[in-house]
Amino acid sequence: MADTHKEWLEKLEAESRVKQEHFMNDIAAKLRHPRMTHKPQHPFRGAPDFWKAFEWTEEERTQAFSDNFLSVGGHVARLQTMDEVKSFIVQKAGEMSAKYVVRQNEPELDALDLEGSLTDVQVSVWNTDAEQYWRARAAEADFGIVIADHAVAYTGSVTVLSASNKGRSVSLLPTVLFIIIPIERLKTRLGEVLETFDDAGREQLPAGIHFISGPSRSSDIENDLTIGVHGPGIVYALIVGQH
């Protein structure tokens, strides 16, 4: 019985391979070129040298990032110091009547002292209370505040990594997202960011790598563009650092 079953499986496989060959030969004939039986050669791997050497100035990076981010509905502010960042967030909290803010547990954000600057606003620091259900707290938040790990001028993208002190929900669930981008982390090309993950190695990769290019946008249903369905509907990129 076992041999019979094995023979039956071998027969099915042989018939399947014949059908596969016929299918592929038929495609080649319709395309009017010989059937390819070997994988194509790739003498070049990765980006060409001229692209790896391509580099914008700080002013050009800032302008290109701003243009790209604005083009998809995001907002950009160029600020000089973290004190200006704090003033900007405090002002927006007043304008938007924010009542609840969740932020990453990062030293740069500790230094902002938002807890002491935002009156009548509850500020929660991610993952500092084991009793809290932090994903729900992030979903309830009016503002989410994060520090960018990287940013890319050519694509207008920001990279935010996940860790125990900076969960992905902080950037994905609040109504309004503020991304603070230190100017030295704003790169020209996407490859400059991706190389850092290659260099770190597989064991050092974070739990999540998130590329953010403006507010949430969806047009799945009848091509009707809707903002904020799958994430923050308003996103501010705050580029901070001396000119």
Image: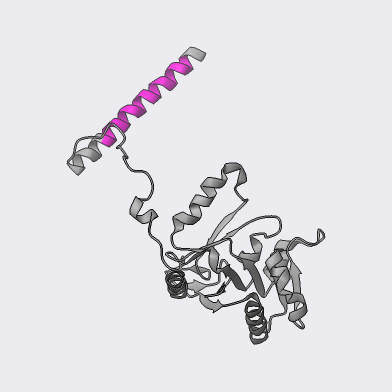
> Is residue 11 shown left or right of residue 129?
left
* Residue projecting furthest to the front: 243
Which residue: 68% across, 84% down? 97
> Is residue 156 shown left or right of residue 164?
left
> Is residue 236 shown left or right of residue 174?
left
* Residue projecting furthest to the bottom: 95
The x, y position of residue 138, in whole percent, is: 69, 67
- Quadrant housing residue 133: bottom right
- Quadrant housing residue 150: bottom right
Q: Kindly report the secondary structure that dominates the magenta region of the rendered protein.
A: helix
- Does any portion of residue 173 appear in the rendered image? no
Residue 17: say if magenta. yes
The x, y position of residue 21, in whole percent, is: 29, 31
* Residue projecting furthest to the left: 32
Q: Is residue 200 above or below residue 163?
A: above
The x, y position of residue 218, in whole percent, is: 49, 68
Which residue: 31% across, 35% down? 39
Which residue: 58% across, 77% down? 80
**Magenta part of the chain:** 4-24
Pick the residue in front: 204 or 35: 204
- Does any portion of residue 8 appear in the rendered image? yes
Q: Is residue 192 above or below residue 240?
A: above
Which residue: 68% across, 60% down? 166
- Quadrant housing residue 54: bottom left
Which of the colour schemes (rainbow, by chain, secondary structure, one colour) is used? one colour
Pick the residue in front: 33 or 192: 192
Residue 6: say if magenta. yes
Pick the residue in front: 127 or 195: 195
Q: Is residue 136 above or below residue 33?
A: below
